[in-house]
Image (cartoon, rainbow, N blue to C red):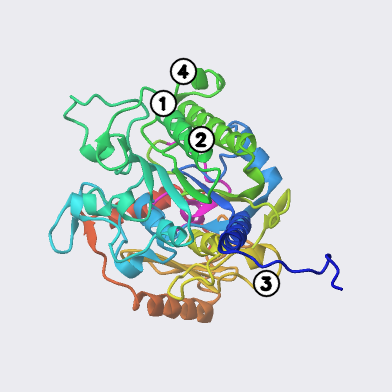
Amino acid sequence: MTSSRHAHKPVGISGLFARILLCCCLFASSAFAQQPNILFILSDDAGYADFGFHGSKDILTPQLDQLASQGLRFKQAYVSAAVCGPSRAGLLTGKYQQRFGYEENNVPGYMSLSGTHGDAMGLPLDQLTMADYLKQQGYRTALFGKWHQGNADRFHPMKRGFDEFYGFRGGARSFYPFSEQNPNHRKEDFLERGFSVYAESDKYFTDTLADASIDFIKKNKNQPWFAFVSLTAPHAPMEALPEDLARFPDLEGTRQIYAAMMWNMDKNIGRILSALEQEGQADNTLVVFTNDNGGPSDHNASDNAPFSGTKANHLEGGIRVPMLMRWPGVTHANSTFDQAVSLLDLLPTFYRAAGGASAPADLDGVDLKPFVTGENTQAPHEFLFWKKEVRAAVRHGDWKLLRFPDRQAMLFNIKNDPGETNDLAASHPELSARLYKILFAWELKLERPAWQLKRQYEGAAIKRMDDYWPKAALKN
């Protein structure tokens, strides 16, 4: 006699369907649990030294300092370009942007090689973005803030992988609402929701972007999501709220305004991170904060110490940026990563975290997870490259070569001389020649710049670089 404990009842069609449905739901729930949400926050034109976690005493960033204490701080993170548009093109595609001709900012004052202007310049349509890749993995994707990858409709974020967009198409705008009747504002500078729905917010711009980001987090708690919070702070124009200015009575001029803008940005980042906690999503969200290039020289407010250089040149102050990562189960509290990484690495890192089988072979970035966990103890990159017109640089290990149009190349040991004050090219001629050849070989694989400045500008860029070298004279 068969025990009822081992008896098998026939399963009807409805019962079978229910079991299949249950299995599918459990599988989907398990898959979702393994896919972290991804919150990517990018500040704009911040100085390297202007963060509490980098030692700043007058620029206060308590929320980002807390994030740094909860996760990993990269000590040598680099952008792929020293100005906004190309830097974003690189991180969005995981490729050196010069490979598809995006070498210059796409702003008024430029022209394409074919003679077209303005709106015709943007991220080429044959290039996939990190939003495209994450949509393939089932993510809901959103961009809040600055786009700067093309003003024309065909370049619109919602045609480049983003399901939602609330921001502006251009490269900079006021932190206060525009008047629609003001003829001095361009269409791409107005606040846009979705596609071509324009309506200004009555709030300070950074507050507005934080509000939109928080709403997105709350709405999408039941599916994996990717939010690119592309802030404009502390990029010019230098505009701060009175209550934020009042926090810095000991500062004056643009430094005071800059400090207030950084405070407001930090406060709003804290609001977004608090929303993750309140919605129960912090333990399943990969958070990355970084900056798009070094602090600029035009408003004399930011500080890139201990490095020489500034936005728009290839000294460390123009291309090395702060970067934090909090990834539950992967990173550890109060930890650092010492080796050089690139913002090109973010796309493959996000894609693999989302469940992508392997990073696409044509990317220049690498998945950072095995490096930060110690699974891979090698350097993430053997070489890193930068180029803008004739000016270029290459880094290999601790060595960095800079090439100029009006003088001999310079060679620096970045580990021993992060301020790049001691030129070693003359004492290491063979290494200088080897790195010069490696740089040239890389350039041979690139496309010609798709657009360029109308005016001559190399001399001005080099002058800025000279002006922002340390006061101490260069050795050798």
Circle 2: element type = helix
Residue at (40, 69) in percent of width and height: 408
Span colored in magenta: 300-321
Q: Which of marks 3 and 4 is in front?
A: 3
Residue bearing the label numbered 3? 376
Q: Is residue 311 located in the magenta-colored stretch of the structure?
A: yes
Q: Which of marks 1 and 4 is nearer the N terminus?
A: 1
Q: Which of marks 1 and 4 is in front?
A: 1
Q: Rounded to the nearest whole Å, what is the CA distance between mark 3 and mark 4?
A: 49 Å
- Magenta residue check for 246: no
Left or right: 260, with 125 as reference point: right
Residue position marked by numbered label 2 in the rendering:
214
Question: Residues under labels 3 and 1: Cα distance?
Answer: 44 Å
The amino acid on which the numbered mark 1 sits, given as a three-letter code, is Tyr
Give the image location of residue 81, x and y in percent: 41, 58
The amino acid type found where label 4 is placed reads Pro
> Disc 4 marks which residue?
242
Question: Mark 2 or mark 4, which has the lower sequence index?
Answer: 2
Q: Separation of disc 1 and disc 2 at Cα?
A: 16 Å
Q: Residue 301 versus residue 247: which sits nearer the camera?
A: 247
- Mark 4 surroundings: few (<14), some (14-19) or many (≥20) residues within 10 A: few
Kindly report the distance in space between the C-alpha atoms of the residues bearing marks 3 and 2.
Answer: 35 Å
The disc, 1 or 2, on the residue closer to the chain's N-terminal end is 1
Snapshot quadrant of residue 340: bottom right
What is the three-letter code of the residue carrying label 3?
Asn
- Residue at disc 4, secondary structure: helix
> Nearer the viewer's eye, disc 3 or disc 2?
2
> Residue 451: x percent and y percent?
22, 60
Q: Where is residue 198 in the image (x, y as percent from the top left)?
A: 26, 33
Seen at 46% across and 72% down, the residue is 360
Contact between marks 3 and 1 (CB within 8 A): the answer is: no
Residue type pointed to by label 2? Ile
